[in-house]
Amino acid sequence: MCTISRSLSTLAVVALVGLPTLVSAQDNHRVGHPGEGLSHNMGLSIGLVGSGVALDLPAGAPNLNGGMGGVTVGYGIRKNITHVARLQFGRLDGSRTDILQLDGETRYVFNDENVRLRPFVDGGLSYLRVSGENAGFVKAGLGLSYFLTPRYALEASGAVGLGKIANVDGTSGLRTGRLGFVWHR
């Protein structure tokens, strides 16, 4: 539980200090002329994503770490707000412990379509199925999208969450780091 508190504290400090700095620095990195910007955040986006995941289990149980891969689909409902769904699957600790993760998130993007680097914050729910056990988590994170072209972006993000795994007493923690390649319509 102490690891989760430190992760949440670190996330809050980075969000409060780092994101405004990134947003203000973007004025020097605008592309195109007014009306000729990069793809905006509204509309459909589809991507491939890879993640590292760590489950912090309570009561002295060993923590589980592993990697996952999957797909992400987003739909921008407003200029700076996007709903994201993600399906990933993988293995934990190099063993035969399978993991399936389904995320539903809402994302707020800080910059407009004329900027290549766009920081964001997101939050939502995660459903995990680990070795036949169900788990639910509430999570929050932050990340960056870097547009290589008007339609294609690289995306990196991290998130922390708290939740409950069936048949495990106490609250468990979830930490994920993601890297993806996204196409925007």
Image (cartoon, grey):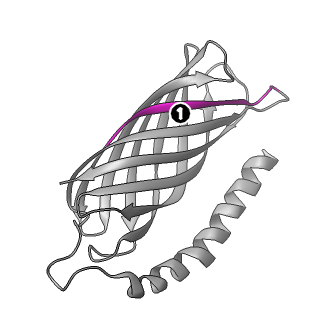
Question: Which residue, given by chain and number where applicable, does mark 1 sit on?
Answer: 136
Q: Which residues are magenta?
A: 61-72
* Quadrant where the image shows the N terminus: top right
Classify residue 43 as left or right of residue 107. Answer: left
Percent coordinates x, y for residue 7 in the rendering? 71, 54
Q: Residue at x 66, y 15 (%)?
A: 95
Decide: is 184 above or below 173.
below
Percent coordinates x, y for residue 136 in the rendering? 53, 33
Q: Residues within 10 Å of mark 1 (few under 14, many from 20)?
A: many
Give the residue furthest to the left.
35
Amino acid type indicated by mark 1: Gly
* Quadrant where the image shows the C terminus: bottom left
Closer-to-camera residue (71/3): 71
Percent coordinates x, y for residue 54 in the rendering? 66, 36
At numbered mark 1, what does the secondary structure look like: helix, strand or loop? strand
Q: Is residue 183 one of those drawn in magenta? A: no
Decide: is 13 above or below 65.
below
Closer-to-camera residue (121/137): 121
